[in-house]
Image (tube, rainbow, N blue to C red):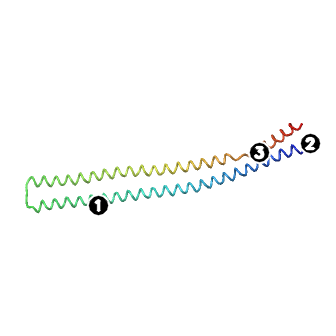
Amino acid sequence: MCSPTVALSAGLSAFQGLAMQSAAKDAAAQTAEQERVGVKSAEDSKRNKQLALSEQKASKEKQEAQNVFAKNIEILQAQSSLLASGKAGNSINLLFADLGRQGGNFRESIRQELESFSRQYDRNIQNTEAEYQNIRNRLRSNTIQAYNQIPSTGSILLGAAASGLNTYVATN
């Protein structure tokens, strides 16, 4: 027959284990909620950063289109002033060709600049994705860790039995 001391020891150990299990479950649930809130915040941050990057890219493209338009007008004005001068000949033809090259060079430099800006934009978008994934993975890891800290019912019962056995051995 089981002595009251052994039963009390095993019961207290089981009660303590169940209380620890309940506290660990509460902590894990709280960590899961923190994960949910954190992931939503990270998604919002990613979306805002990507929106800002998109607006910046669109603004840059519009600005450069205006610059090209202004340069085209400048070249056309220079060509019309050459035509209005009434001069003709090889030197005028060379000036026309030079103005055309200047316009072409300007447009090409803008194209290259926009291409470089576009590549940087793509890298920035990838960085926001990676940052989001890192935050999400870290929060998920914290939640998994919290759930792994919950003691199983079997281990609680085993601990209670061991406590009862130790008490039994110590009293006999």
Taking the spot 78% from the left edge, 42% from the top edge, the residue there is 159
Q: Position of residue 151 (x, y in %)?
A: 72, 46
Write down the residue under mark 3.
156
Q: Is residue 49 left or right of residue 24?
A: left
Write down the residue under mark 1.
66
Q: Is residue 164 left or right of residue 127?
A: right
Q: Position of residue 80 (x, y in %)?
A: 15, 62
Q: Residue furthest bottom?
A: 84
Q: Position of residue 130 (x, y in %)?
A: 49, 48
Please state which of residues 135 and 6 is positioned toward the viewer in this rendering.
6
Please state which of residues 107 and 132 is positioned toward the viewer in this rendering.
132
How far apart, in angstroms, are the residues tagged by discs 2 and 3?
23 Å
How far apart, in angstroms, are the residues tagged by discs 1 and 3?
74 Å
Write down the residue under mark 2.
1
Amino acid at the residue labelled 2: Met
Which quarter shows the N terminus?
top right
First in residue order: circle 2 vs circle 1: 2
